[in-house]
Image (cartoon, rainbow, N blue to C red):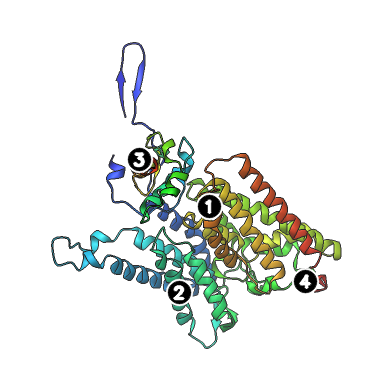
């Protein structure tokens, strides 16, 4: 993916990823929660990343070249914690 | 894309999922610059070098502030002694120049092109306001993409609050002596026109003068045609979300029409439709919608929240214009809306898709706001209309 190999730009909250996600979750919220330290487990669970089908559309459409899908995938581990 | 021939049918092999956007975030900011071009050219025609001076000073100030900020942010890698050291070229991205340039142009176009008192202090006012806007509006939050306030709106509000009384005397209107500009302009699209609620102001002649920009005002806000070209460009390129623009304009027009109908009820000289379009074309409403409100960084994220955001900002603009003593409501309302955005978008109740709850919330807030405003209008002081 030449697009995602480029230097990551800051997220400009364009909401392309939110509007295109086929299962209707909010990838950029999940990303912001994952990037905050310490990660808020209850918040990650409430955002329901387990619905994600790993389709990768959010990474494809992001104009800033952020790999959103990978971050959502990582958040699934946290969402599965008891 | 290559075509692979199989036996029964011809199939096309393409990357999956299909790419939807072909341009990145830098192209979006370049688009914003292009959308600002018609307004800037118009200001140059109408105000000559004075408009360009304002724009240049604020752009240079904001760019320098952002540059210093980038150096401070990356000080660990820039001044490292070992192999982790990076050069300035590696840490700077085009966005670090484009974003402050756009904020600076927008701010410079909103500043009134008047003489200042004392003479020559405009440089000081511009530099201080631009620094305030970019530092407290954007850089303290972590730079491009993380700001909750629009830097241009913050700078403008600071300038209005601190230095409004210092701008006095003549405008540098029609610096080139162009024949199609009315040099004896009586209606100003600037602050002063909005505080006068006289019935004779709301005529279609004034509306057309405001629309074509043949009258005095803040540099960028006079010619509505140039602004509409910029808005159309941004919408066609899908750089801004049409939801917030449409919901703002619909709410604004409905509320202005209600105010116009109430005024017509008390004074037959007022034409409610002329009043509505006078409100739309005067001051910085269209300019603010195009360049301040529609900036995605400071908007809520989901479509239903964006519609609600537009409704709330429109309500604040009309309320400030009709009832407050402050003349120009757009920048204030955009800033208050920015502060509300993260509340509207709280993850517990925001929803990325339209569902019944959000359709109800948007519809109910629209109706309730119109009703509350009509109720407020019964207490309006109609004696000022005479
Ligand atoms: S990868 Fe997951 S979060 Fe991203 S668009 Fe697909 S389903 Fe949505
Ligand atoms: S598509 Fe990229 S830039 Fe846009 S909101 Fe999502 S993460 Fe942010």
Looking at the rendered image, the disc whose residue lies closer to the viewer, 2 or 3, is 3
Packing grade of label 2 (10 A; few <14, some 14-19, many >=20) is: many
Read off the residue under disc 2. B132
Quarter assignment of residue A51: top left
Chain ID for label 3?
A: A
Separation of residues labelled 4 and 3 (CA atoms): 61 Å
Q: Quadrant of ligand 1?
A: top left
Disc 3 residue lies near ligand 1 with CB under 8 A: yes
Disc 2 and disc 3 in contact, CB within 8 angstroms:
no
Horizontal and vertical percent position of residue B206: 71, 65
**Mark number, residue B163:** none
Packing grade of label 4 (10 A; few <14, some 14-19, many >=20) is: some
Which of the two residues, B113 or B28, is positioned nearer the viewer here? B28
Read off the residue under disc 3. A73
Read off the residue under disc 1. B345
Above or below, B369 against B190 in this view is above
Separation of residues labelled 4 and 1 (CA atoms): 40 Å
């Amino acid at each position: 993916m030449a697009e995602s190999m480029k230097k990551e730009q800051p997220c400009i909250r364009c909401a392309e990823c939110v509007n295109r996600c086929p299962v209707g979750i909010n990838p950029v919220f999940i990303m912001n929660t994952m990037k905050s330290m310490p990660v808020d487990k209850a918040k990650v669970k409430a955002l329901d990343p387990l619905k994600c089908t790993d389709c990768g559309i959010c990474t494809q459409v992001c104009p800033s070249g952020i790999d959103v899908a990978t971050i959502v995938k990582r958040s699934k581990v946290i969402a599965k914690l008891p | 894309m290559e075509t692979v021939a199989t036996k029964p049918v011809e199939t096309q092999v393409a990357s999956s999922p299909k790419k939807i956007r072909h341009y990145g975030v830098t192209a979006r900011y370049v688009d914003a610059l292009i959308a600002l071009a018609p307004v800037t050219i118009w200001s140059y025609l109408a105000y000559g070098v004075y408009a360009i001076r304002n724009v240049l000073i604020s752009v240079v100030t904001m760019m320098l502030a952002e540059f210093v900020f980038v150096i401070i942010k990356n000080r660990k890698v820039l001044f490292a002694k070992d192999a982790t050291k990076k050069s300035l070229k590696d840490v700077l991205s085009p966005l670090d120049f484009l974003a402050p340039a756009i904020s600076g142009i927008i701010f410079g176009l909103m500043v009134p092109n008047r003489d200042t008192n004392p003479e020559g202090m405009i440089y000081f006012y511009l530099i201080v306001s631009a620094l305030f806007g970019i530092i407290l509006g954007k850089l303290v939050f972590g730079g491009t993409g993380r700001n909750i306030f629009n830097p241009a709106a913050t700078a403008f509000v600071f300038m209005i609050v601190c230095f409004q009384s210092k701008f006095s005397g003549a405008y540098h209107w029609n610096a080139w002596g162009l024949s199609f500009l009315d040099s004896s302009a009586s209606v100003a699209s600037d602050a002063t026109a909005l505080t006068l609620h006289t019935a004779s102001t709301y005529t279609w002649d004034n509306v057309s003068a405001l629309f074509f920009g043949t009258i005095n005002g803040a540099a960028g806000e006079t010619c509505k045609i140039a602004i509409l070209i910029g808005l159309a460009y941004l919408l066609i390129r899908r750089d801004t979300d049409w939801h917030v623009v449409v919901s703002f304009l619909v709410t604004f027009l409905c509320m202005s029409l209600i105010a116009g109908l109430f005024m017509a009820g008390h004074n037959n000289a007022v034409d409610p439709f002329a009043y509505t379009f006078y409100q739309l074309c005067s001051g910085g409403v269209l300019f603010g919608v195009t360049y301040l409100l529609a900036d995605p960084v400071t908007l809520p994220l989901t479509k239903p929240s964006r519609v609600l955001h537009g409704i709330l900002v429109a309500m604040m603009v009309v309320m400030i214009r009709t009832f407050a003593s402050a003349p120009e409501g757009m920048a204030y309302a955009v800033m208050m809306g920015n502060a509300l955005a993260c509340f509207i978008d709280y993850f517990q109740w925001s929803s990325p898709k339209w569902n019944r709850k959000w359709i109800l919330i948007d519809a109910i807030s629209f109706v309730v706001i119109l009703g509350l405003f009509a109720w407020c209008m019964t207490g309006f002081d109609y004696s000022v209309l005479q």
